Amino acid sequence: GQQLNQSPQSMFIQEGEDVSMNCTSSSIFNTWLWYKQDPGEGPVLLIALYKAGELTSNGRLTAQFGITRKDSFLNISASIPSDVGIYFCAGSDSNYQLIWGAGTKLIIKP
Amino acid sequence: NAGVTQTPKFQVLKTGQSMTLQCAQDMNHEYMSWYRQDPGMGLRLIHYSVGAGITDQGEVPNGYNVSRSTTEDFPLRLLSAAPSQTSVYFCASSYSRSRSGSYNEQFFGPGTRLTVL
């Protein structure tokens, strides 16, 4: 079946640092979605990407749909304490089924 | 709009007991789905529905049943709970599964945290 590799698994960062995470797929996707999950809550959609090469921002967050349609990255600039949580990528294939990454856990160093 | 609601928020069961996790959405979404989330495993699809009266299996359907009698509701039934079903369960919905673009964006409920002893 299709696989979606998300890295890194976890990140320890200082407040104010920039963060970068990515997802790669073994097959082509038509849509990339980035979600954030706060502790004890359900995932919430951050950014949606629909075209290869598309670069989209949402405040301090920027995500790009890779040209090959097999990868996407999410950057967070100048991290703040409320950025902690788990970030998930999800890709939609030609059958419109969403394939999920395993998540990147963001932790702010005290 | 309340969005996607789930009840209960927490549940403890004994092995062999059955129960139903409730999910409802008020956005007139065609597509609804159930996921389970285990540490380090991300979200795994249990069952999904593309409309009232239509359900299908996802990646990990064993031990679970679903039905979709209305557009709004999509309950998940555990037939005979096992410790391996201890997990956090999320219900999600989207406008459609058969169209691209924003129709595929899924909205999640707050989750049900289930422990099976």
Image (cartoon, coloured by chain):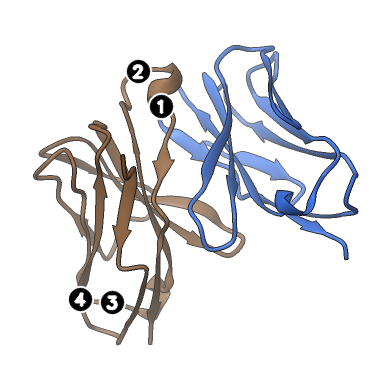
Question: Distance of mark 2 from mark 3, alpha carbons?
Answer: 36 Å
Q: Is mark 2 on a helix, strand or loop?
A: loop
Question: Do tag 2 and tag 3 residues touch (Cβ < 8 Å)?
Answer: no
Task: Name the spot of residue A72 as percent of width and height, x first.
Answer: 68, 27
Which of pointers 1 and 2 lies earlier in the amino acid sequence? 2
Q: Residue B18 carries which label?
A: 4
Which of pointers 2 and 4 lies earlier in the amino acid sequence? 4
Same chain, labels 3 and 4: yes
Residue found at x 31% / y 39%:
B1
Chain holding disc 4: B
Residue type at tag 2: Arg
Q: Is mark 4 on a helix, strand or loop?
A: loop
Which of pointers 3 and 4 lies earlier in the amino acid sequence? 4
Of circles 2 and 3, which is in front?
Answer: 2
Q: Which mark is residue B104?
A: 1
Question: Distance of mark 3 from mark 4, alpha carbons?
Answer: 6 Å
Residue for badge 3: B81
Question: Do tag 3 and tag 4 residues touch (Cβ < 8 Å)?
Answer: yes
Question: Do tag 1 and tag 2 residues touch (Cβ < 8 Å)?
Answer: yes
Q: The blue chain is which one?
A: A
